[in-house]
Amino acid sequence: MNRSDSLQIDGVMLNYFIGDPNLSSYSVVMLDEAHERSVNTDALFGILKCLLQRRLDLKVVVTSATLDCEKFSQYFNDAPILNVPGRVYPVEIIHSNNLRFGPTDTDQIVTATVSKVLEIHSEGAPGDILVFMPGQMEIDRVIEKIKDGIFAIRAAGQLDLYPCYASMPWETQQQIFNAAPIRGRKVVVATNIAETSVTIDGIVYVVDSGIGKVSTLNLNTGVVHLNTIRITKAQANQRSGRAGRTQPGKAYRLYSEADYEGFEESPTPEIQRLSVVDIAFKLLCIGITPEFKFMDPPSEEMMRAAVRTLQDLGAINENQQIDFIGVADEKISNGTRAFKNSGHVIPVALHRGSVKHC
């Protein structure tokens, strides 16, 4: 049997399972950045868990810097845990016990962030600064206000400012790796994209607003809202760790230690806060087995909403059977186009935490 190596995003790998449910061309699957818990990744967890029962020769490696190892180990039938120590340097964490603002207090968040950056630039030892803000709007405001404030401390040296968020062109994102000015420092103002995806040499200081944004589906309206919320402990720890990737550093948290202790341990998986219509349809296309279980299943309400939507689109009939002839494929997923007009009918039943192939 021929084997091949490939690097795929989670959605592409899901589509691959539709054509080859046994993943016959591969002997090892590595799922990296598993802590991000996207809808597609959670579906892959369940598919691979089932596949491991059929293919005893298959090896699955799940990796992450901030994984709940015990939970994942139990889910994958008490799989062994291997801890690989990374090269990290000590980071001094400084909480701001005098600051009190909520996730939507944008003006206060921006003002506190700018003040801390200018203080570091004026009084701190050499080293670049990484700032975490919830979104592009807040990033732009912080950069503009830093530009306004830098004139008062010109003697501290040059300050190069770089925004960083997911929707930026790749070429623009790469500018964050530019060398800092000889007589100054650079400041990268980023969203949570900089928590795990990139390591920037020269970062000595982290300024953490403690705020982030998550997308959540409103089942009543069918609209996805981008909500500004407090981050979790896992995210706070990951952000602080950015200051110690290449040398010892400091992390300034713009919230109190008591606030930190009140944070949730980890983010809510996407599959519990976003639509599961697309992923339910893909799972049915794959023809998953009765043993399939989500690690953190979506709510019963979300599953019922998915069934109603698939029926409205003509993707499944009143008996929850897929009839590809009636599928409006462009409204569900590009991954189903190979099945258009195939004439196949797959009887299925959707249940909370599982999708059973009858």
Image (cartoon, grey):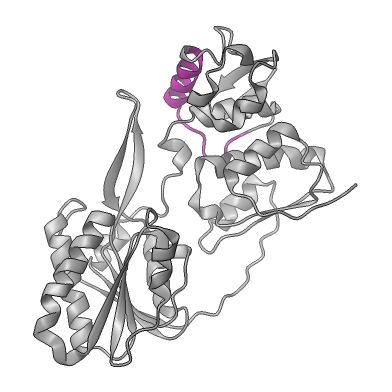
Magenta stretch: dominant SS? helix
Work out whether residue 1 or residue 211 is closer to the camera in this orientation and state it: 1
Is 49 above or below relative to 71? above
Write the residue at 55% across / 57% down: 33
Against 114, residue 291 (above or below) is above
Residue at 63% across / 24% down in the picture? 284
Q: x, y percentage for residue 202?
A: 41, 83
Q: Quadrant of residue 295?
A: top right
Q: Is residue 292 above or below residue 157?
A: above
Outermost left residue: 152
The quarter of the picture where the C terminus appears is top right
- Residue 243 part of the magenta segment: no
Q: Which of 62 and 118 is in front in this view?
A: 118
Task: Return the residue found at the far top.
Answer: 318
Residue 283 drawn at (x, y percent)? 62, 29
In the image, which residues are magenta?
Answer: 293-311
Residue 295 in magenta stretch: yes
Q: Please indicate whether residue 186 sits to the left or right of residue 273 in the image.
A: left
Tell me which residue sits at (69%, 32%) in the image. Answer: 18
Residue 63, image quadrant: bottom right
| Callout count | 0
Residue drawn 68% across the image and 29% down it: 286
Q: Is residue 234 left or right of residue 25?
A: left
Locate residue 181: give its quadrant.
bottom left
- Observer-nearest of 20 and 338: 338
User: Would residue 97 be visible to someone looking at this image?
Assistant: no
* Image x and y of residue 309, in percent: 45, 18
Q: Name the residue furthest right.
A: 1
List x then y, in percent, for residue 152: 9, 84
Res 12 seen here: yes
Q: Is 248 left or right of 263, judged from the image as shown?
A: right
Above or below, 101 against 10 in this view is below
